[in-house]
Image (cartoon, rainbow, N blue to C red):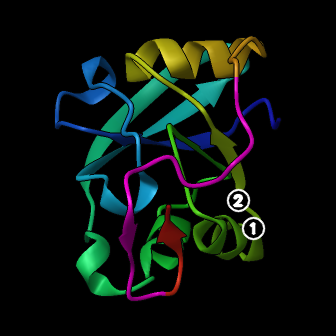
Amino acid sequence: MDQNATVAIACESAEGLASNVSGHFGHTPFFVVAKLAGNAIGSSRIVPSPGHGQGCSMPGFVAQLGVSAVLVGGIGAGAVNGLGAHGIEVVAGATGNAGAALAAFANGTLITSEPGCHGGKHDHACGHQHR
């Protein structure tokens, strides 16, 4: 990880770093965009998500935020590939408080899982499915 990284955390609310990490990238209502300086969290801001209804434009939207990594609970393969095409690292399996997840990421102690959908059964217009 770059010691001066900018990271987007998919969040359930607009409470900044006090928000809970979103369980699904494509349905996240907000992102907290935070700057890291080494292991320290610098400035952060809340950015409303364009939502899944915009097709599969979320990776492009996130790329425009200037981030090098995304922290999220769950994410589908299409989004992982889209973010990867923009050079953005995907860190799936984050849970709990966004600030704590970001601090653990900065310290290299965040427990992660393999990126993939973690949701109920439903289909999406952009082709990925939850089963």
Q: As shown in the figure, which amino acid type bears the numbered disc 2? A: Ile
Whether 119 is drawn above or below 71: the answer is below
Residue designated by label 1 = 84
Mark 2 residue crowding within 10 angstroms, few (<14) / some (14–19) / many (20+): many
The residue that disc 2 covers is 88
Q: Secondary structure at mark 2?
A: loop
Q: Say if mark 1 contacts mark 2, CB within 8 Å.
A: yes
Tell me which corner region of the image, top left, top right, bottom left or bottom right, holds residue 40.
Answer: top right
Where does the image place residue 26, in percent across and percent down from the top left? 39, 63
Q: Can residue 22 be spotted in the picture?
A: yes
Q: Is residue 24 above or below residue 112?
A: below
Report the front residue among 64 and 20.
20
Within-10-Å neighbours for mark 1: few <14, some 14–19, many 20+: some
Where is residue 55 drawn, in percent x and y? 36, 87
Secondary structure mostly seen in the magenta stretch: loop
x, y percentage for residue 41? 53, 19
Residue 60 locus on image (x, y percent): 51, 78
The label on residue 115 is none
Q: Quadrant of the N terminus?
A: top right
Q: Amino acid at mark 1?
A: Gly
- Please say if 70 is above or below 14: below
**What residue lies at 70% left-to-right and 27% top-to-bottom?**
112
The front one of 113 and 40 is 113
Residue found 47% across the figure and 62% down from its top: 65
Residue 11: say if magenta.
Answer: no
